[in-house]
């Protein structure tokens, strides 16, 4: 059975977002392979943001580079975590990453060989975290060695055939290889041993969706959400299943219901997933040279973040709108947005600098 290689991984039901139209904004500032040029000179243009290779197009105008870098930095600084790079040892504000976090960081930075070594070491040390086995499979995929990864896990399973995490890892590996029948069997076997593995439920939902068993797929993904309502990949997976069914309104309806009935973690998951879609839409519209529509997308995102009471998202949206209005020449409106940012987050360096320079 062939599988759709343009689809994401089990977390999102699509290939990695970094291969989409605007990967730098999704990956974070550490993946933008450009340096800010000196100010001045060139007129603002609408050159596409990305090249065929998926990197920021190095030929767009200097003012636009400054704008985009400001947006990127503002988004990164709005979160209480690092974006793409590990914190330095003995950082006064951020703790040193755990071995598992370090492996995940290497994976996110596409240092697949190094990540693979770390995940193998963690498994050798007896890690029972499902995320480690997922990371192992993704590292093998990144190095183009999925078949070798299967052999690695099969060898471990021969000595411990009932290990739920090994069964999950093998199921995940089968999924990445498009082997949906074996993937379903392994994942069910893993869940028989450990029914609390949210990643396994989500991956099983992805497998069933590939087989067009949408009703069952939805049940599995919703079980994953019940177990871990903070993981946005599960909501994105659910949203994608509804889209494949042609029922895009169901996700929004469930979001609205979560606002009424709770819990808050559920409305956060639905809302943040919808906000991410608006963010990507906004950047796409900007790259197409549609400033009014871009501001509308970010304004809708702002209202959504306010609706779910998510201050980090509110700060992100406010600062982005400030940048966009500043670019349009409406400085008074831009300054109002920067002032709103500082009311919520007085330590926001970029917003404070913007107001200091007026």
Image: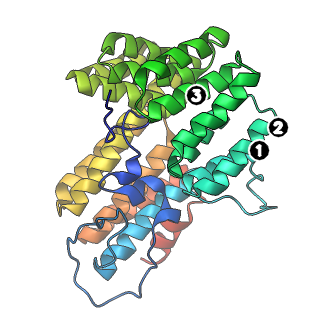
- Of tags 2 and 3, which is closer to the observer? 3
What residue is rendered at 28% in x and 52% in y?
A: 282
349 displayed left or right of 288: right
Q: In this view, does 281 lie above or below 86?
A: above
Q: Name the residue under label 2.
A: 125
Q: Which of marks 2 and 3 is nearer the N terminus?
A: 2
SS under mark 1? helix
Q: In this view, does 256 lie above or below 315?
A: above
Q: Where is residue 29 in the image (x, y as percent from the top left)?
A: 49, 63
Residue 43 is tagged as: none
Q: Position of residue 26 (x, y in %)?
A: 42, 52
Is residue 259 in view?
no
SS under mark 3? helix
270 displayed left or right of 93: left
Q: Name the residue under label 3.
A: 170
Q: Mark 1 points at which residue?
A: 121
Q: In this view, does 88 lie above or below 217?
A: below
What residue is rendered at 40% in x and 29% in y?
A: 237
200 displayed left or right of 92: left
Q: Is residue 104 above or below residue 326?
A: above
Along the viewing direction, whichever of 37 and 22 lies nearer the viewer: 22
Q: Which of marks 3 and 1 is nearer the N terminus?
A: 1
Q: Give the colouring mode of the picture.
A: rainbow
User: Dot 2: within a 10 Å radius of its alpha carbon, few (fewer than 14), some, or many (20 or more) residues?
Assistant: few
The answer for how far apart the CA atoms under marks 2 and 3 are is 19 Å
The answer for how far apart the CA atoms under marks 1 and 2 are is 6 Å
| In contact (CB < 8 Å): disc 2 and disc 3 | no
What residue is rendered at 44% in x and 62% in y?
A: 72
Q: Where is residue 310 in the image (x, y as percent from the top left)?
A: 49, 37
What residue is rendered at 28% in x and 76% in y?
A: 60
User: Dot 3: within a 10 Å radius of its alpha carbon, few (fewer than 14), some, or many (20 or more) residues?
Assistant: many
| In contact (CB < 8 Å): disc 1 and disc 2 | yes
């Amino acid at each position: 059975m062939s599988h759709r290689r343009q689809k994401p991984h089990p977390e999102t039901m699509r290939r990695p977002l970094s291969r989409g139209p605007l990967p730098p904004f999704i990956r974070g500032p550490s993946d933008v392979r450009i340096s800010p040029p000196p100010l001045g000179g060139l007129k603002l243009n609408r050159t596409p943001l990305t090249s065929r290779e998926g990197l920021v197009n190095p030929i767009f105008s200097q003012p636009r580079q400054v704008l985009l870098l400001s947006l990127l930095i503002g988004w990164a600084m709005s979160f209480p975590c690092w974006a793409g790079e590990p914190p330095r040892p003995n950082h006064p504000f951020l703790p040193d990453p755990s071995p598992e976090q370090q492996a995940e960081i290497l994976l996110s930075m596409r240092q697949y060989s190094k990540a693979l070594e770390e995940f193998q070491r963690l498994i050798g040390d007896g890690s029972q975290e499902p995320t480690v086995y997922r990371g192992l499979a993704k590292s093998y995929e990144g190095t183009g060695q999925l078949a070798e990864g299967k052999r690695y896990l099969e060898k471990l399973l021969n000595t411990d055939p009932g290990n739920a995490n090994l069964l999950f890892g093998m199921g995940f590996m089968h999924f990445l290889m498009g082997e949906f029948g074996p993937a379903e069997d392994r994942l069910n076997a893993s869940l028989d041993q450990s029914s609390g593995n949210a990643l396994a439920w989500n991956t099983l939902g992805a497998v069933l969706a590939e087989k067009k068993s949408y009703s069952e797929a939805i049940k599995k993904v919703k079980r994953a959400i019940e177990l871990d309502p903070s993981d946005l990949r599960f909501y994105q997976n659910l949203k994608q299943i509804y889209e494949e069914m042609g029922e895009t309104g169901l996700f929004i309806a469930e979001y609205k219901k979560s606002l009424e009935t709770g819990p808050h973690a559920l409305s956060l998951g639905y809302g943040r997933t919808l906000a991410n879609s608006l963010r990507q839409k906004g950047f796409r519209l900007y790259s197409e040279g549609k400033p009014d529509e871009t501001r509308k997308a970010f304004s809708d995102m702002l209202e959504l973040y306010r609706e779910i009471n998510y201050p980090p998202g509110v700060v992100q949206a406010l600062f982005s709108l400030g940048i966009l209005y500043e670019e349009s020449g409406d400085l008074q409106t831009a300054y109002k947005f920067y002032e709103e940012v500082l009311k919520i987050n007085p330590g926001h360096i970029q917003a404070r600098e913007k107001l200091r320079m007026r």
